Image (cartoon, grey):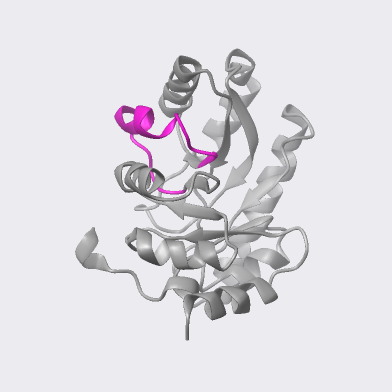
Amino acid sequence: MSIASQLAQVKATLPAGVELIAVSKTHPSEVVMEAYEAGQRVFGENRPQEMAQKYEQLPKDIEWHLIGHLQTNKVKMVVPFVKMIHSVDSPRLVEAIQKGAEAVGRTIDILLEIHVADEESKTGWEWAELLEYVRSGAFARMPNLRVRGVMGVATNTEDEETVRGDFARLHQYKEELASSFGPEFDTLSMGMSHDYSLAIEYGATMVRIGSLIFGARDYSKK
């Protein structure tokens, strides 16, 4: 089945108000272009260097979302063009993005990644730490950042109740944080190819789908 057909199948399952982030990590620009020609304009990448290379090679009306862990020393690679950074998980990263965005004269949309999975390998703020940081008023000193919402990754398990619990917590956290931000705090990014239908049940407004569109990742390109 073609990428265009797979993309259409995925889009047909998404209700109104849920945005598709087509996760193109490890796939070459030619493959991304197939999805672009089928009408997709929003793509997600994990690695800053790979995203920067694709930005140079592909049409400039693509919206690039960085969804993977971002090291502070890689921020400068993406701030000139990135549309949204989903994986903001520490005060140091917040400050680095603010500094980088200010240097290039941009305001950048970010999401606060919260750790909910029952896996130590997953990144993200611990809830208590994030709540304290938000309540400190730190974001008021970040004029080049626009905090749009929350992002998270559910536990990698076949136990549906565990996954539902993770998504329910992310939704709850987003609701609790909303009063600290303005009306633009409207985004809940959660759900991937294997669990996005559950994420939508719990209020996801963005889903990050790769393999259902592009097929299995090419790990040789990691």
Q: Position of residue 150 (x, y in %)?
A: 61, 44
On-image quarter of the C terminus: bottom left
Numbered range of the magenta stretch? 67-85
**Label total for image:** 0
> Does the magenta segment cover residue 24?
no
Residue 52: x %, y % from top left: 35, 41
Residue 47 vs residue 168, the one in the foreground:
47
Q: Is residue 105 above or below residue 162?
A: above
* Residue 136, x across and y down, in percent: 61, 18
Q: State the residue in front, 146 or 141.
A: 146
Quarter of the image for residue 132 reads top right
As drawn, 201 above or below 134: below
Give left or right: position of 171 versus 28: right
Which image quadrant is residue 8 in? bottom right
Residue located 50% across and 56% down the image: 153
Q: Is residue 13 visible?
A: no
Front one among 63 and 172: 63
**Residue lying at 54% horizontally and 39% vertically, measured from the top left:** 83
> Residue lying furthest bottom in this view?
1
User: In this rendering, is residue 85 above or below 24?
Assistant: above
Residue under the image location 61 percent in, 16 percent down: 143
Q: Position of residue 155 (x, y in %)?
A: 47, 63
Of 114 and 195, which appears nearest the observer? Answer: 195
Residue 176 in view of the camera:
yes
